[in-house]
Amino acid sequence: MPWTTIQVEKLDNFFIKGESTSERTITYSQAILEATDQSLERDPRVFVLGEGIDDPSGVFGTTKGLQEKYGKERVFDTPISENSLTGIASGAAMAGLRPIFIHSRMDFLIISLDQLVNHACKWSYMFGGKVKVPLVVRTVSARGWGSGAQHSQCVQGMLMNVPGLKIAAPATPYDAKGLLVSSIIDNGPVLFVEHRWLYKTIGNVPEPLYSIPFGKGIIRKEGGDITIVAVSWMVVEALKAAEKLAECNISAEVIDLRTIKPIDEEIIFSSLKKTGALLVADTGWKSGGVASEISAVVSEKAFHLLKRPVVRVCCPDAPTPASDILEKAYYPDSDTICKEAVRLLKGGDSVG
């Protein structure tokens, strides 16, 4: 099946619709399933392995029916042995296949860092580019159902430090399909981060196979007073916040980075030329994470564009609580973004 790169239109609202010329709407999970299905059909080198693939729910519906369609040789469940299986998937990639390895919980991706960081991400460099490692690691992150400190983490910021690894964090069904296709056809390892709360979101998604380039963010809402750079689920919260801020006569521009490695620096700098104020919203922790890296890049390359200090809206530097009440206090949302945006614009100190 042929694939093409499709230009994406910016969103007008937080219902995640109107991204393409397609009138067809499907869920985030269906978009991932469709991208996987079409890639399996198109390329016999593609196969899927991981935890819970053949369960009735099929990893939130993203692998449902694939084993029946393509057989157990190409779509199969694996033991809960993260490091070993990541090594097996990396070896298969080096041998010429294109594995999609699913870590159903990002927390336990940490167990596989030896294979991912010391092997998959280094072999191409160590062999002078003669070895390719076209490995996709899908991982499910974030909050849900009182999962607590060991089942609710977003560690994508930790892995931004690894040379040779690309990281995609799509926030819409359109991007989920297009970026997964880009990940599969890429010749290096890609970490594909899926926030649990995004699976049931709905958006316009074309049926034909298409790809979206890495390192190309998109403006979801235009504005002139403050730039909000958001990642993954925080794009949804940022769009909600932008509507609330409009009621306070604050015009917020919302940028969805789509990929956090590479980062689209130019789209951020271009927005800051208009606004002079930056708020970065991420699903992970504040210290040493995605928001910290973006803040550092702006401070290093675009400090002259800032009129106020950069603000980070992230999870506090503490383990995730299991209590529902404590969860609500722990996780930032649209109200948090609004509060910090107002504080920055109306009460923050100027840097210019």
Image (cartoon, helix red, strand yellow):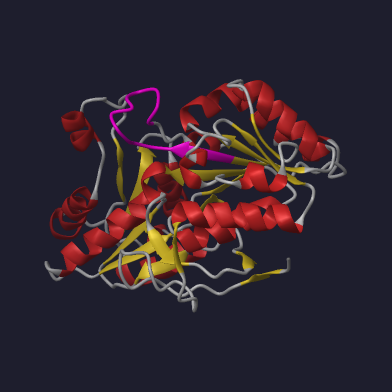
User: In the orientation shown, which residue stands out farthest toward the bottom?
Assistant: 21
Task: Please state the horizontal and vertical placement of residue 205, each as a whole percent of the image.
Answer: 50, 67
Task: Please state the horizontal and vertical placement of residue 280, each as a whole percent of the image.
Answer: 35, 51
Task: Please state the horizontal and vertical placement of residue 281, each as a whole percent of the image.
Answer: 34, 49
Left or right, 47 with reference to 341: right
Q: Relative to the observer, which residue lies in front, 51 or 245?
A: 51
| Residue 212 appearing in the image | yes
| Residue 263 appearing in the image | no
Q: Residue at x 40, y 57 (%)?
A: 303
Name the quadrant of the C terminus.
Answer: bottom left
User: On screen, 260 above or below 6?
Assistant: above
Name the quadrant of the N terminus.
Answer: bottom right
Q: Please say whether residue 118 is one of the residues in the magenta stretch.
A: no
Q: Main secondary structure of the magenta part?
A: loop
Q: Tell me where residue 101 sits by quadrant.
A: top right
Q: Relative to the observer, which residue lies in front, 147 or 214?
A: 147
Left or right, 111 with reference to 311: right
Which region is colored magenta? Answer: 138-152
Q: Residue at x 64, y 22 (%)?
A: 83
Task: Please state the horizontal and vertical placement of residue 293, each as a whole percent of the image.
Answer: 46, 45
